[in-house]
Image: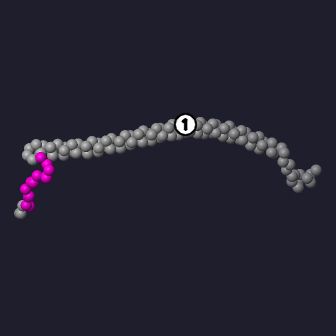
Amino acid sequence: VQQPSVGTHSSADGESTGIIGLLEVAESDFTKLLAEVEADEKDAQDSYDKQTKANKVAKAEKETSLKYTEKELKETESALAELRGDKESESSELDAVLDYYSKIKKQCVAKPDSYQVRKQR
């Protein structure tokens, strides 16, 4: 297996040399990295805050919708119970009317007499 060739480290032109220079480069790298991480963290926090706010709004909308839906359901159930009661009373009234009609129908409808009955008169 061949090892890749590694070049020697050369100092940048215009930069300090030695340990102080190395520490200054490390400090600038850490400062840059810290700034990037803080910016990313701020963006993530902003995104989280927006999502949390949107979730709260959606939850409030759904709770309100649920409240009105439950209210409408109760009103519909009470109207249904009232209509069922009305139907039962109307049905019993209709049965009574039909019963009375069947009793008086015999009196109201003239039946033609048979030939033998008319012949006897």
Q: Find disc 1 in the rendering and name its residue.
A: 71
Quarter occupied by residue 92: top right
Q: How is the image coloured?
A: one colour
For this view, does 40 lie left or right of residue 100?
A: left
Q: Residue visible at 6% across and 63% down?
A: 2
User: Closer to the camera, 90 or 58?
Assistant: 58
Q: Is residue 103 magenta?
A: no
Q: Is residue 88 above or below residue 1?
A: above
Residue 65 drawn at (x, y percent):
50, 40
The answer to whether residue 111 is visible is yes
Mark 1 Cα-neighbour bin, 10 Å: few <14, some 14–19, many ≥20: few
Q: Residue visible at 8% across and 44% down?
A: 19
User: Closer to the camera, 51 or 108?
Assistant: 51
- Quadrant location of the N terminus in the rendered image: bottom left
For this view, does 87 lie left or right of residue 3?
A: right
Q: Residue visible at 14% across and 50% down?
A: 14
Most distant residue in the bottom direction:
2
Tell me the amino acid under the disc marked 1. Lys
User: Closer to the camera, 66 or 120?
Assistant: 66
For this view, does 81 lie left or right of residue 33?
A: right
Q: Residue visible at 37% across and 40% down?
A: 49
The answer to whether residue 88 is visible is no
Quarter occupied by residue 89: top right
Residue 40 drawn at (x, y percent):
29, 45
Q: Is residue 11 magenta?
A: yes
User: Closer to the camera, 46 or 72?
Assistant: 46
Residue 17 drawn at (x, y percent):
9, 47
What is the chief secondary structure element of the magenta stretch? Answer: loop
Most distant residue in the right direction:
121
Residue 36 drawn at (x, y percent):
26, 45
Residue extent of the magenta highlight: 4-16
**Count of numbered circles on the image:** 1
